[in-house]
Image (cartoon, helix red, strand yellow):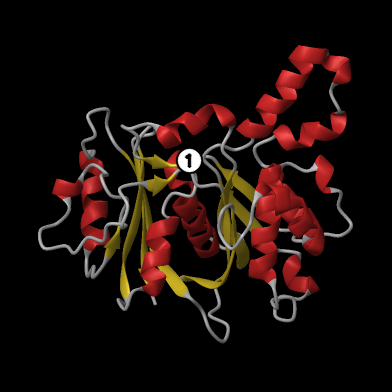
Amino acid sequence: MNPLYLLQKGEAILGRDGLTLDLLATEFKKFFPQEDPRYIDDASKLAGLAASHAWEGAADVFGPETQKDFAVIVGTALGAIDSTIGFDAQALQSGPNAVNPMDFPNTVANAAGSRIGIWLQLRGPNVTLTNGGTSFLDSIGFGFQSVNNGIFQDCFVGAVDKVPAFLRPLATSDDTHFELREGSCFFLASDSAQQKYLVQIIDFLSLQLKTDFMVPKCFLPCFERLWEGIEWIGCPAGAPLESKFPRGLTRYSPPTSVFELGLGGLESLEAFLKAPASSGIIAAFSKPERKFSFIKVKK
């Protein structure tokens, strides 16, 4: 298997670097002056900003010919729920004739990824994955598998989420393990290392657990292959299967006992980028789907 190289990173996360919802439209307009932010949902604006940051300076390397086959892979736990609720509420309150048809594109799950392709003229495959809290790692894993299957050579891989109002009480609940972090993160990725790269993805495994959270027997050989030679692991604190990790495995736990809803795995990936370790595994767990995703990484 050939590695997938993550070359550049771009983020647009609310509450970070002074970015707020009030400033989102203004920041978006700086990168896409031809677009009217009034008719674009917040998730798409966040994704557009993150992708633009990752794309900065890359146009000289990825020319027009490359862009014809340049893919966009987006992971999202919540998709377009926020926009859909607003659109449907308007129709219910004022009648279907009062709904602005310009708002309808905001209600589809792949709105953010499709718009990145349009805005940056990336005409390769455009895929949106809605896999709960593992969506971020699964987008990277999909890119890794697609490159190795010859579907494309270059891509954006990342995630975006905007939390709807009805989920916000989770953030203040005493028994919650979620942190409702909103935003987007994208990596410019390629099957070529170029002159430099942040990290290389060298393996990927997606695992669906049984209802009792036990590992299916058919996956055990995959685990043995994946665990081989591991030096480091990043995994959301409090995730199950902790006792089933191989004996002697060093496990990283984020400083807070939460993982990011929607951007599953981002916190562990960022920790690995800052760590001195040269290789290891990053894992994310999504409890509603009983799903674990792993990527094996190397600097």
The local crowd at label 1, few if under 14, some if 14 to 19, many if 20 or more residues have their Cα within 10 Å, is many
- Residues 286 and 19: in front is 19
Q: Say which quadrant the C terminus sits in.
A: bottom left
Q: Is residue 176 left or right of residue 129?
A: left
Residue at the (66%, 53%) spot, across then down: 47
Residue at the (74%, 37%) spot, across then down: 106
Q: Is residue 255 left or right of residue 193?
A: left
Residue 19: % across, % down: 63, 56
Q: Say which quadrant the N terminus sits in.
A: bottom left
Residue at the (45%, 57%) spot, across then down: 266
Q: Amino acid at mark 1?
A: Asn
Residue 171: % across, % down: 44, 37
Residue 295 seen in this snapshot: yes
- The relative height of residue 102 versus residue 281 in the rendered view (above or below) is above
Residue at the (66%, 52%) spot, across then down: 46
Q: Callout 1: helix, strand or loop? A: loop
- The relative height of residue 61 versus residue 51 in the rendered view (above or below) is below
Residue 125 seen in this snapshot: no
Residue that mark 1 sits on: 131
